[in-house]
Image (spheres, grey):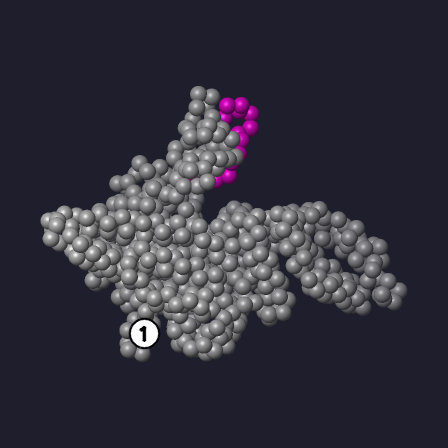
Amino acid sequence: MKIIKRDGRAVDYDREKIVTAIEKANKEVRPGQRASKEQIKEVIHYIEELNKKRMLVEDIQDIIEEKLMELGKYELAKKYIVYRYTRALVRKQNTTDESILGLIKNQNHELSTENSNKNAVLASTQRDYIAGEVSKDLTKRILLPEKISKAHEEGILHFHDADYFLQPIFNCCLINIKDMLDNGTVMNGKLIESPKSFQVACTVTTQIIAAVASNQYGGQSVDLKHLGKYLRKSKEKFQKELQEAYADKLPQDIIDNIVEQRLKAELSAGVQTIQYQINTLMTTNGQSPFVTLFLNLDEDNEYIEENAMIIEEILKQRYKGIKNEKGVYITPAFPKLIYVLYEHNCLKGGKYDYLTKLAVKCSSKRLYPDYISAKKMRENYEGNVFSPMGCRSFLSPWKDENGEYKFEGRFNQGVVSINLPQIGIIADGNEDKFWKLLDERLELCYEALMCRHYALLGTKTDTSPIHWKYGAIARLQSGETIDKLLKGGYSTLSLGYIGVYETTKLVKGVSHTTEEGEKFALKLMTHLREKVNEWKKQTGIGFALYGTPAESLCYRFARIDKEKFGSIKDITDKGYYTNTYHVDVREKIDAFAKLQFESQFQNISSGGAISYVEIPNMRNNLKALEEIVKFIYDNIQYAEFNTKSDYCHVCGFDGEIIINDDNEWECPQCGNKDHNKMNVTRRTCGYLGENFWNEGKTKEIKARVLHL
């Protein structure tokens, strides 16, 4: 049996430690209250008879207390409880030392793997992580109510962003880039006036992005439709300069041609500035800015032609990629791209279909863009189309004092996610018990979310001038609090959720893709939505139901529950829970059916939702991808493709790894044959999982495979 320590380490079970602990308590009580050796053996025998492969150390201590009480050793049990409490106090004096020292020595595996966008070896990243560990420690021991800290540790809920809770920092936002560009802004005490050209506007935009990212926790989004104005400014400037210099010397068509050439050069340079600035700037978070560019060809925008040119250039440069240190073109992690589908570009003969074809080509090679259907989004958000905050968290419609809808310049205060499968496990098939326990835990989530809210109340604008004083969120006065932006639905508080599929299996015994399971899953999702609406009405705060995109949380909840309840077939034995309402990856379902099925959950989960389909060999499936994009426009609000492509970690080659004459995978660029240093798509099924060797076959292809 393995014992799971409080820091997550698994150690061998040692019965002598139980003997030692009880005997220490024995010495503190009267002889008549002491446990005999036989009684101590009885306690140990009971624990071992459970036949568990893994147990939490806290569970063993709970059992010892219960058994001592059953034996009538009340005084001894009290001493043991006091001893246990004293040890807990000693641990609580400082819980950060080991994690920080492990980080510096590159031995803290949890931190080094929690965020793939952050290199835990870099000094700048370590500095951020050190601050985060201190914040998490203080949050757990002092700032949060004990029951919420305990609920987080036990996997009842997940209190997101504890590593920033110590500071008045919120989660994510939509930058009001239009206001900042049109009216100017201030950074580091320096006035930045409204740009006079496209390239300057691109430079200012990336500087704003970096400054914003350094003063908040989560992602941010920028709607690029506001840059069209500045591309036109550049064109008008070129026209004026050339007309003044050459009107009497060159034919008008030559002047116009020179203007177009200069404009294309500026467009290319400006977009390249955005791409390279975002990927080379380092924020105080120890990573590139977590930013999403919203490729929004809004038909009502007067600069739609300029915006079409900008989107085309962005897609072309993303398709090409960025060179790594080896000089090989790779896919950058940021900026993330979201492409909006309208009637004029949904591949039904519209004027801008050529852009969508380019977007699909880009998706086939570079993972992005994701796709939003303006048609479906308008159905769900009172006729509005707007970007999610960072990547997947959506705001609710809100009107200003003039009755105008406003989305840019708003933000999310924080997120707390509920572990739905754990409730199903405890309910053990009793549906009445499930709903009762769900409501109890939702109240705990509500209290945790209100902790996020209360922590931000009283925050002064001077804590982050770029947000509160100079336009990213608002233009409040120096010394003013941000309290009015925390109420009235201007900003959101998000309830996340994990594992609708597993919960349905536990409660109803079937997948949520069956008729009976679907009915239960919709009832569950509707109940969650009604609960956040109830909180919103009760408090006036913008609560929202959020399809949590944190993949790591799927593993964390499953790991905790496996340690607590053991291996449960099709639930904890997989090592993960299915994210949100998604169909489990092992179910036989085609891309269209999957998107159609999941679309019904997206309008319920209005605070954030995304669906995805996995398609192997996407580079050779452009027509199929185009058909899916058409389907997205008519059927689902937000979707993405998960492409499976080969990749060499030695040289960064992003193409097709070949099979050489020795029946081995080989990178055609650098000759790497080490299967541990490459991703290889299995041609038959497209699976991309863990590397392994097939025992007993000397010439087995060293690949990432699902089926032998």
> Is 367 on the left or on the right of 651, as rendered?
left
Estimate how packed mark 1 is, as few (under 14), some (14 to 19) or many (20 or more) residues with alpha carbons within 10 Å.
Answer: few
Query: Magenta stretch: residue 260 in it?
Result: no
Q: Position of residue 68 (x, y in %)?
A: 77, 62
Q: Position of residue 572 (x, y in %)?
A: 54, 50
**Does residue 580 show up?**
no
Q: Which residue is mark 1?
A: 399
- Image vertical order of residue 436 relative to residue 341, above or below: below
In the foreground, 300 or 41? 300
User: Which element type, helix, strand or loop, lies under badge 1?
Assistant: loop
> Is 353 on the left or on the right of 214, as rendered?
left
Residue at position x 45%, y 77% in the image: 478
Residue at position x 71%, y 59% in the image: 61
Residue at position x 27%, y 63% in the image: 378
Task: Give the magenta range.
Answer: 686-700
- Image vertical order of residue 687 relative to residue 552, above or below: above
Q: Residue furthest right?
A: 31
